[in-house]
Amino acid sequence: MSKPMRTSFNLSLLMAFILCMSNSSCSKDYPGSVRSADFNTRFEMGVDDSVALPKWGKELFIKLSRINDSRCPENVQCIQAGKAEAGFTLVAEDLTEYDISLCLGQCSGTDKTSDTAAVNLNDTGYTIILHEIKRNGVAKAVLEIKKE
């Protein structure tokens, strides 16, 4: 994504969050919505959802851009267990951004991804943990973000 497009995306994300928080009818379950969560607490998000942290704050935004799940289905015998990957964009209050990919399952080799990433934005450390990818119906990622 080019720098002008990223800046436009970041400003759009920030405006959507502000509008959502000022509107009491903002739905927590609407796809592509901006919701809020607390640090050190697990939360769910679907593709194109954005979450603001801390709850009702604007210190950090996280957007789930993709989920690729090639894990073996339950009750099926597979040669390999497979893996599930989720791609995220973190956006700090000053619009500094960082893209990460987290993975569950067989993630070794050239992927070099894991279920946990440490990120430093604006001299603040964050640890992002992918706990689960739910695949019943619409795929959702279960995350936790710890502030250092």
Image: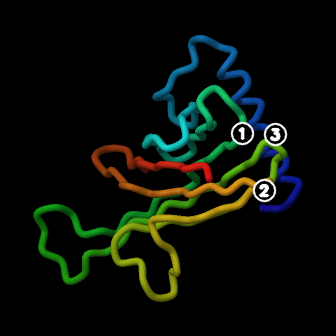
Numbered disc 2: secondary structure: loop
Mark 1 to mark 3: distance in Å?
14 Å
Q: Is 65 in front, or is 141?
A: 141
Mark 2 to mark 3: distance in Å?
21 Å
Residue 9, position as x, y percentages in the image: 77, 46
Q: Give the residue type that dot 3 points to.
A: Leu
Residue 35, position as x, y percentages in the image: 57, 31
Q: Residue 59 carries which label?
A: 1
Mark 1 to mark 2: distance in Å?
12 Å
Q: Give the residue type that dot 1 points to.
A: Glu
Q: Are marks 1 and 2 in contact (CB under 8 Å)?
A: no
Residue at which label 2 appears? 123
At label 2, counting other C-alpha atoms closer than 10 Å, the crowd grade (few under 14, some 14-19, many 20 or more) is few
Residue at 61% of width from left, 47% of height from top? 63
Q: Earlier in the sequence, mark 2 or mark 3?
A: 3
Residue at which label 3 appears? 11
At label 3, counting other C-alpha atoms closer than 10 Å, the crowd grade (few under 14, some 14-19, many 20 or more) is few
Q: Earlier in the sequence, mark 1 or mark 3?
A: 3
Residue 22 located left or right of residue 67: right
Residue at 72% of width from left, 49% of height from top? 91
Outermost residue toward the right?
Answer: 4
Residue 127, position as x, y percentages in the image: 56, 58
Front label number (2 vs 3): 2
Outermost residue toward the front?
Answer: 148
In which quadrant will I find the N terminus? Answer: bottom right
Q: Earlier in the sequence, mark 1 or mark 2?
A: 1
